[in-house]
Every structure is written in structure tokens, then in C-alpha cells.
């Protein structure tokens, strides 16, 4: 893919794992259990994208689609301050949209093209990508329709990422697979559709106290290595 740019995560170890940060013209999927740091990383990236290029950013704004009401302006301001930005201005540079259901979520992304064209948007966050879909289309009988809608949504996001040279970050919770006895009993909730649509998947796990462990999987371009980082008052750090 030509002309891709990178946004630093603000965590050196994680940047190294990603080959310099998260890429534009691609979807990066953060997968992990509750409390693994997905939302914290989304907050942090919404700040990092605003930094100048020499500090790992794109000097651009972020579009933040919040489906679970977990966006915290105070947290944004806290992280922004640590990264040397004016907290109020940093918050204004994050265009926030609360998605109330899956149709609303898809509509926001569809309509976002107009905003992205006008504003200098370098990052689109969807936190969480799958939560509404999972609750509105439960069970096997709804699986086909759910996957079809998610497919469409993901294709749309990829297209926008490509056209506007923006990075897309989505989160996905893991669900238990009771019928799996060997290997990892957890799997990403979105299933294979997301595996095909997302360019990079980062698996996050909890370590001791504020330590988190990240690993990239399903990527031929990245090492199957684990790195650790911490979540502190300053945000997500080495
Ligand atoms: P997920 O979105 O994967 O469910 P989060 O990104 O919300 O998880 O991570 C929540 C965790 O982040 C909390 O359990 C806490 O450990 C840590 N955290 C959040 N805010 C702060 C803070 N201000 N200082 C230190 N740790 C924090
Ligand atoms: Mg979250």
C-alpha cells in the first residue's frame, strides 16, 4: 500500500512490535478481555495522532465513535497534558459520536465522510466495533445477518481509511469458547469476518497490577513476540 503513514502508540515496545506504530489505510483491531486496556489505547491514540510528525503523530484530528459510553474527557485531558498538548484543545480535536445501536453506528461511519473531507482526520476509533452487533443479533440463527452487516461496516471503514489516508482502530472483546479444550479457550467475538477485514490484530492481556501484555497475531509481517506496557496516570507507557 502506497503512501501509508504511522501513528506512534506512545509506547516504544508496542511501536517496535507494530513496525513504527499503527498504519493509515488499514484497520488495527485491539482484541482483549474486559480491562485489558483497549479503551485506554484508543484514548491515547486520539492524543498521539495530534502530535507533530517528529513526535510520532500526524498533526491531525481524531474521530471517536463510542458505543459503550466509556469515553472519558478527563482522561483525554490528563494524557494530553503528559504528551505536551493543551488539554482543552486536544479534547476539541477529538470529534466525538456516541453510537446507540448498530444501525446508528453504521450511519455515523457513512456520514463521517463529509466530516473527514472538511476536517483533517488522521484517526478513526470505533470502540467497540462488535458490541451492538452481538447484542442485537444473538445466537446462531442471527449469525448470517450479523456477519453480513459487520462485513459491510468493515468494508466501509477500510474504504474510508484508504481514501483519506487515515488509520482506523477498532476494539473487539474476546468471548469464551466452551467447546475448545486445547489451545486458547478465548476467541475474538467478531469471528472470521474481522480476521479478513482487519489488517492487523493486536491481542491484549492483563498482567500483574497495571502491566499489560500485547501480541500481534495472524500477521505475516510481524514477529510473534510479546511486549509489555503499563497503564498509569500518564496514560499508556513503556
Ligand atoms: P478495556 O477497554 O479493554 O475493557 P480499559 O482500556 O478500559 O479496558 O482499561 C481499564 C483499565 O485501565 C483499568 O482497569 C485500570 O487498570 C486502567 N486505568 C484506567 N484509567 C487509569 C488511570 N487514570 N490511572 C491508572 N490506570 C488506569
Ligand atoms: Mg473498553
Image (tube, rainbow, N blue to C red):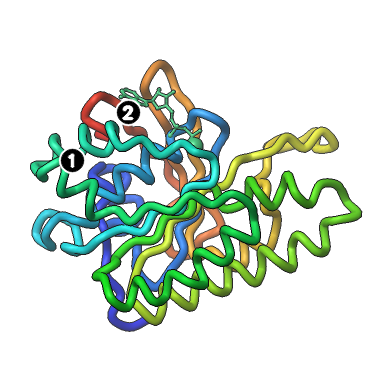
Instruction: Please report the residue visible at 43 percent of the width from the left and 45 percent of the height from the top.
Output: 225
Residue 166 versus residue 231 in the image, above or below: below
Q: Under 8 Å from ligand 1: the CB of mark 2?
A: yes
Residue 55 x, y percent position in the rendering: 11, 54
Nearer to us in this view, 51 or 64: 64
Quadrant of residue 181 within the rendered picture:
top right
Q: Which residue is mark 2?
A: 231
Residue 153 versus residue 210 in the image, above or below: below
Residue 112 x, y percent position in the rendering: 43, 69
In front of the other: label 2 or label 1? 1
Crowding around mark 2 (Cα neighbors within 10 Å: few <14, some 14 to 19, many 20+) is: some
Marks counted in the figure total: 2
Crowding around mark 1 (Cα neighbors within 10 Å: few <14, some 14 to 19, many 20+) is: many
Disc number for residue 20: none
Residue 147 versus residue 181 in the image, above or below: below
Is 147 on the left-hand or right-hand side of 29? right
The reply to whether residue 161 is visible in this rendering is: yes
Is 118 on the left-hand or right-hand side of 152? left
Instruction: Please report the residue visible at 24 percent of the width from the left and 56 percent of the height from the top.
Output: 49
Instruction: Please report the residue visible at 25 percent of the width from the left and 60 percent of the height from the top.
Output: 61
Which image quarter holds the C terminus?
top left
Instruction: Please report the residue visible at 15 percent of the width from the left and 40 percent of the height from the top.
Output: 87
Disc number for residue 80: 1
Nearer to us in this view, 180 or 106: 106
Residue 128 x, y percent position in the rendering: 54, 47
Is 235 on the left-hand or right-hand side of 141? left
Q: Residue furthest right?
A: 141
Q: Under 8 Å from ligand 1: the CB of mark 1?
A: no
Nearer to us in this view, 118 or 169: 118
Mark 2, secondary structure of its residue: strand
The reply to whether residue 20 is visible in this rendering is: no
Amino acid at each position: 500500500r502506497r503512501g501509508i503513514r504511522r501513528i506512534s502508540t506512545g509506547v516504544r515496545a508496542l511501536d517496535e512490535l507494530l513496525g513504527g506504530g499503527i498504519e493509515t489505510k488499514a484497520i488495527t483491531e485491539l482484541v482483549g478481555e474486559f480491562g485489558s486496556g483497549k479503551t485506554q489505547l484508543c484514548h491515547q491514540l486520539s492524543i498521539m495522532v495530534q502530535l507533530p510528525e517528529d513526535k510520532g503523530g500526524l498533526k491531525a484530528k481524531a474521530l471517536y465513535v463510542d458505543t459503550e459510553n466509556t469515553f472519558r474527557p478527563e482522561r483525554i485531558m490528563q494524557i494530553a497534558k503528559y504528551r505536551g498538548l493543551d488539554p482543552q484543545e486536544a479534547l476539541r480535536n477529538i470529534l466525538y459520536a456516541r453510537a446507540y445501536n448498530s444501525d446508528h453506528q453504521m450511519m455515523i461511519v457513512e456520514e463521517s465522510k463529509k466530516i473527514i473531507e472538511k476536517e483533517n482526520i488522521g484517526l478513526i476509533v470505533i470502540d467497540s466495533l462488535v458490541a451492538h452487533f452481538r447484542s442485537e443479533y444473538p445466537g446462531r440463527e442471527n449469525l448470517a445477518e450479523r456477519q453480513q452487516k459487520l462485513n459491510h461496516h468493515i468494508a466501509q471503514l477500510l474504504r474510508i481509511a484508504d481514501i483519506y489516508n487515515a488509520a482506523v482502530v477498532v476494539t473487539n472483546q474476546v468471548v469464551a469458547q466452551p467447546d475448545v479444550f486445547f489451545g486458547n479457550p478465548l476467541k475474538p467475538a467478531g469471528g472470521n469476518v474481522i480476521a479478513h477485514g482487519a489488517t492487523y490484530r493486536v491481542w491484549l492481556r492483563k498482567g500483574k497490577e497495571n502491566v499489560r501484555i500485547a501480541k500481534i497475531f495472524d500477521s505475516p509481517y510481524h514477529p510473534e513476540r510479546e511486549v509489555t506496557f503499563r497503564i498509569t496516570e500518564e496514560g499508556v507507557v513503556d
